[in-house]
Image: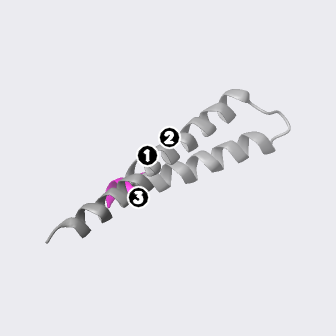
Amino acid sequence: MMSRTINYILILVGAIVAIYAKAGENQNQFILIGGIMILMLGIYRVSRTIPSKKDIQEEDQTSNNKP
């Protein structure tokens, strides 16, 4: 539960930083890159917890074969 919250906070902070860096007249490329990196880290951490479709289908097949 706590790691899920951290993941969503990373995504939110990364998006806000990236939008802030892009909106300014004097864009700082390093802040933009940092925001995108934080955003992608959050997305990666969320995607690790989602099971693949293949894994779900294999679980269904093994549970159907049990007597």
Q: Which quarter shows the N terminus?
A: bottom left
Which residue is label 2 attached to? 41
Residue highlighted by disc 3 = 5
- From the image, which quarter does the C terminus lie in? bottom left
Magenta-highlighted residues: 1-6
Residue pointed to by mark 1:
45
In the rendered picture of this protein, how many numbered marks are placed on residues? 3
| Real-space Cα separation, disc 1 to disc 3, in angstroms | 11 Å
Q: What residue type is labelled 3?
A: Thr
- Per the rendering, the mark at residue 64 is none
Q: Distance between the residues labelled 1 and 2?
A: 6 Å
Element under disc 3: helix
Viewer-nearest residue: 62 or 23: 62
Q: Answer yes or no: do the residues labelled 1 and 2 have beta carbons within 8 Å? A: yes
Quadrant for residue 51, please give it.
bottom left
Between discs 1 and 3, the one toward the N terminus: 3
Near-viewer residue (61 or 47): 61
Q: First in sequence: mark 2 or mark 3?
A: 3
